[in-house]
């Protein structure tokens, strides 16, 4: 399954939306782990991580609503979190945390951007309201773009 191809079915769309859910779960798990593992984080970095957790949770719920509308099952956060923690060390210094947040936000932005492009190229009709789908994905892409800007602002302030 690739975002380089137009969306051909509800099943394919549901699986792609589930990838978006997983991306949000990774962002939430990594941000939470950074907070737990790094006592004494500076105010702006702590706030950035808390905001990332809140946004990821909101984005995941919005994606899950779309998946539910397609009558597909989503991946539970509890299933993803242990996998993320097993593969990821979060006790890092400031620069590592900020670069990790930048990577997470850029990856999510690119995913939503590519998904919107694939939908635009698709001639297949999907089983949910296409205007609502595009609006939701556009909102998520915009939020991720703002997340990238927030992280780069923090990086510039520290430079």
Image: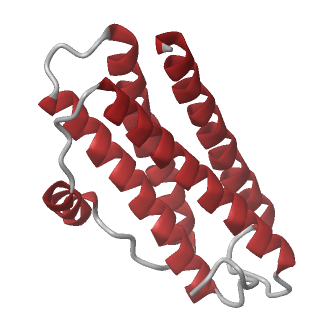
Kindly indicate the quadrant of the structure image that contains residue 40.
Answer: top left
Q: Extreme front residue here?
A: 159
Would residue 131 appear left or right of 95 to someone viewing this image?
right
Quadrant into which the N terminus falls: bottom right
Would residue 103 appear left or right of 10 to someone viewing this image?
left
The residue at the point 56 percent across, 17 percent down is 156
Residue 87 x, y percent position in the rendering? 19, 61
Q: Is residue 92 something one can see in this rendering?
A: yes
Q: Quick one: 112 or 37, which is closer to the camera?
A: 37
Kindly indicate the quadrant of the structure image that contains residue 3.
Answer: bottom right
Q: Is residue 58 something one can see in this rendering?
A: no
The residue at the point 42 percent across, 24 percent down is 48
Would residue 71 appear left or right of 85 to someone viewing this image?
right
Residue 23 x, y percent position in the rendering? 43, 58
The residue at the point 17 percent across, 54 percent down is 85
Examine the rendered structure and indicate whether residue 18 appears above or below residue 159: below
Q: Quick one: 132 or 8, which is closer to the camera?
A: 8
> How are the colours assigned in the image?
secondary structure
Kindly indicate the quadrant of the structure image that contains residue 146.
Answer: top right
Examine the rendered structure and indicate whether residue 99 appears above or below residue 158: below
């Amino acid at each position: 399954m690739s975002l380089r191809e137009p969306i051909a079915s509800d099943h394919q769309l549901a699986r792609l939306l589930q990838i978006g859910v997983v991306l949000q779960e990774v962002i939430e798990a990594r941000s939470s782990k950074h907070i737990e593992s790094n006592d004494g984080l500076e105010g702006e970095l702590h706030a950035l991580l808390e905001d990332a957790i809140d946004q990821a949770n909101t984005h995941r719920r919005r994606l899950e609503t779309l998946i539910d509308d397609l009558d597909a099952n989503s991946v539970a956060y509890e299933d993803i979190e242990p996998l993320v923690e097993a593969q990821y060390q979060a006790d890092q210094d400031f620069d590592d945390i900020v670069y990790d947040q930048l990577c997470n936000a850029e990856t999510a932005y690119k995913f939503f951007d590519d998904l919107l492009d694939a939908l635009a190229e698709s001639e297949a009709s999907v089983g949910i309201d296409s205007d609502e789908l595009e609006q939701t994905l556009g909102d998520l892409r915009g939020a991720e773009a703002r997340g990238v800007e927030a992280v780069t602002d923090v990086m510039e302030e520290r430079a």
